[in-house]
Amino acid sequence: MTMSNYIRNLRQHIGSALLILPSVTAIIFDEDSRILLAKHADTKQWVAPGGSIEPNEKPTDAVIREVLEETGLVVAPRNILGVFGGRDFEVVYANGDRVTYVMTVYECQVTGGKLKPDHAEITQLRYFGVAELADLNMAHWATVVLPEIYAARSS
């Protein structure tokens, strides 16, 4: 996770104590209903593209920014698929920093750009079918969100 100046400033005051952070996640399906996932460089885990909302940033602008930064794609947020939070969304980073995310998940449509990982934060990008998810090393929150998204999509 790349730390923003805002979070860095908070950490100077509170150390590694638990932070509650608003975040966004993009669900991007291809024409075969496969979902785009990104492999993080630091954790080696697969997740849907997304990240923290910056101060004074609209959530829709945050999801557009995060997808462009991580994948090279330009997207248009279409629908809110859900808002998630709780213990399943708490992360302890390697440096000891604790964060619990409140995550707004958007279905997004690709409108431009070229699929290319940033190689700083993301090492690989790939579309996966629902049957492939069980075998992936995914962040815990992704194992909660993605099956729910697929279940809602198929109903």
Image (cartoon, rainbow, N blue to C red):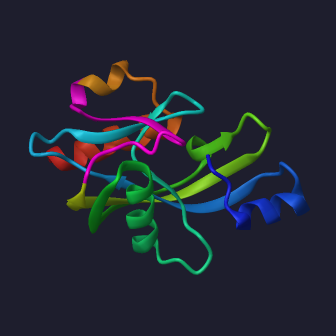
Which quadrant of the figure has residue 42?
Answer: top right
Residues 49 and 132: in front is 49
Q: Is residue 123 left or right of residue 79?
A: right
Verify whether residue 63 appears in magenta. Answer: no
Residues 47 and 146: in front is 47
- Against 147, residue 114 (above or below) is below
Which quadrant of the figure has residue 116?
Answer: top left
What residue is shown at x 83% (from left), y 51% (from top)?
A: 17
Q: Is residue 29 left or right of residue 65?
A: left
Residue bounds of the magenta highlight = 114-131
List x then y, in percent, for residue 84.
48, 55
List x then y, in percent, for residue 47.
43, 39
- Against 77, residue 139 (above or below) is above
Q: Is residue 128 left or right of residue 44?
A: left
What residue is shown at x 73% (from left), y 34% (from top)?
A: 94
Q: Looking at this view, name the residue that lies furthest to the bottom.
A: 56
Q: Looking at this view, name the residue that lies furthest to the left.
A: 31
List x then y, in percent, for residue 74.
29, 62
- Against 33, residue 104 (above or below) is below
What residue is shown at x 35% (from left), y 18% (from top)?
A: 135
Which quadrant of the figure has residue 48?
Answer: top left
List x then y, in percent, for residue 151.
24, 42
Verify whether residue 129 appears in magenta. Answer: yes
- Against 35, residue 129 (above or below) is above
Q: Is residue 62 left or right of residue 112?
A: right
